[in-house]
């Protein structure tokens, strides 16, 4: 089983679990609510390639996830992007049993549809 380490950035001191329940509540995700009705929490695959809006984040959270439980949107082995043009691909992935997806919006990222336990928290700024 291959595990993948994912990184989430925030200015909020979060304890225990990261949750998609806050999806759409901030300026980073409010536009994404038009893409899908599925709530999700976003992560980066690498610490050196993040969007500029997170350069000043106070905290970086690390989670570990079974890579097989995430659908790779770049590889799209099931041709879902073509099949579901204009439809909610995240809803379809969740229905098929995936817990999230890996993709690339210019930066390698992932999203999860469910709460996940935080493995570690790092304070980035004081």
Image (cartoon, rainbow, N blue to C red):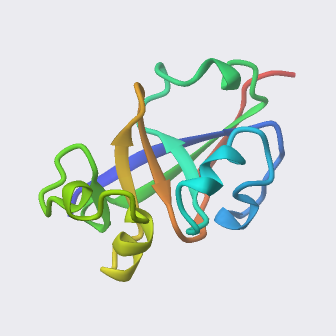
In which quarter of the view is residue 84 placed?
Answer: bottom left
Task: Please state, as top left, top right, bottom left or bottom right, where the N terminus lies in the image.
Answer: bottom left
Q: Residue at x 72, y 67 (%)?
A: 21
- 101 with respect to 36 (left or right): left
Q: Residue at x 44, y 55 (%)?
A: 64
- Expressed as whole percent of the image width and height from the top left, the position of residue 123 reads 75, 31
Task: Please state, as top left, top right, bottom left or bottom right, where the C terminus lies in the image.
Answer: top right
Residue furthest to the right in view is 126
Q: Residue at x 80, y 21 (%)?
A: 125
Q: Is residue 83 above or below residue 109?
A: below
The answer to whether residue 38 is seen in the rendering is yes
Q: Is residue 77 above or below residue 47?
A: below
Q: Is residue 119 above or below residue 121?
A: below
- Expressed as whole percent of the image width and height from the top left, the position of residue 103 reads 35, 43
- Expressed as whole percent of the image width and height from the top left, the position of residue 45 reads 41, 37
In which quarter of the view is residue 39 placed?
Answer: bottom right
């Amino acid at each position: 089983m291959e595990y993948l380490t994912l990184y989430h950035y925030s200015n909020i001191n979060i304890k225990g679990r990261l949750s998609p329940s806050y999806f759409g509540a901030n300026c980073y995700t409010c536009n994404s609510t038009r893409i899908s009705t599925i709530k999700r929490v976003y992560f980066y695959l690498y610490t050196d390639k993040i969007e500029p809006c997170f350069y000043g984040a106070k905290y970086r959270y690390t989670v570990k996830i079974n890579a097989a439980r995430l659908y790779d949107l770049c590889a799209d082995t099931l041709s879902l992007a073509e099949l579901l043009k204009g439809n909610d691909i995240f809803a379809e992935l969740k229905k098929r049993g995936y817990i999230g997806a890996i993709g690339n919006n210019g930066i390698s990222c992932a999203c999860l549809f469910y709460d996940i336990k935080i493995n570690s928290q790092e304070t980035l700024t004081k």
